[in-house]
Amino acid sequence: MPTLTRVLGAATAAYSATIIAAPQVLAKPCRLTTVTGSTPAPVRTLIKGIGARDAAIGVAMMAAPPGRVLRTALAARVASDAADALIFGLTLPDKRARRKVAVFAVFWAALCAISAVTR
């Protein structure tokens, strides 16, 4: 489990740092930007919160010792992505964005789940 899980944790942490620094990276595919392409302040706040949550999980996936702690971090990643898929998939204002974001979140949850059983 550790190798793929650690790589996915690093990717999660890196993407999360990116959306904290540049919330439009997530706001744009979610179609939560304005007609001029800017990201409204409330959307930036929520995306930065998601980024902080995911950065913490990603770092835990990279740093946790093998065993129960690492499995718990991985379960948190899978659960967070599944919840994102459900919530964004049902509630984003744009139908195409709902589908695209939900599919990506399910893909990432599945990839992380698979990492638990691969070596």
Image (tube, grey):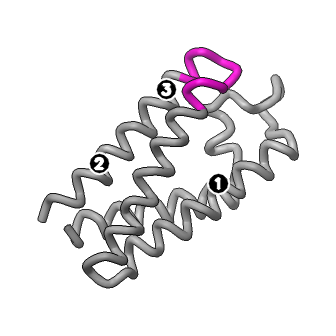
Judging by the rendered image, the residue that carries numbered circle 3 is 100
The residue pinned by badge 2 equals 111
Q: Which residues are magenta?
A: 88-98
Residue underneath mark 1: 50
Is residue 94 part of the magenta span, yes or no?
A: yes
Q: Is residue 83 magenta?
A: no
At horizontal 81% and vertical 37% (from top left) the residue drawn is 38
Task: Label 3: state its secondary structure.
Answer: helix
State how many labels appear: 3
Give the Cα separation between the discs numbered 1 and 3: 18 Å
Q: Earlier in the sequence, mark 2 or mark 1?
A: 1
Amino acid type of the residue that numbered disc 2 sits on in the rendered structure: Leu
In the picture, the quarter occupied by the N terminus is bottom left
Pick whichever of labels 2 and 3 is earlier in the sequence. 3
The local secondary structure at tag 2 comes to helix
**Rendered location of residue 27, percent (x, y):** 68, 38
Determine crowd level at label 3: few under 14, some 14-19, many 20+ residues with C-alpha closer than 10 A: some
Residue at image position (63%, 31%) is 30
Q: Identify the secondary structure beneath mark 1.
A: helix
Circle number at residue 66: none
* Residue at mark 2 to residue at mark 1: CA–CA distance: 19 Å
Principal SS element in the magenta part?
helix
Q: Nearer the viewer, residue 67 or 60?
A: 67
Identity of the residue furthest to the right in this view = 41
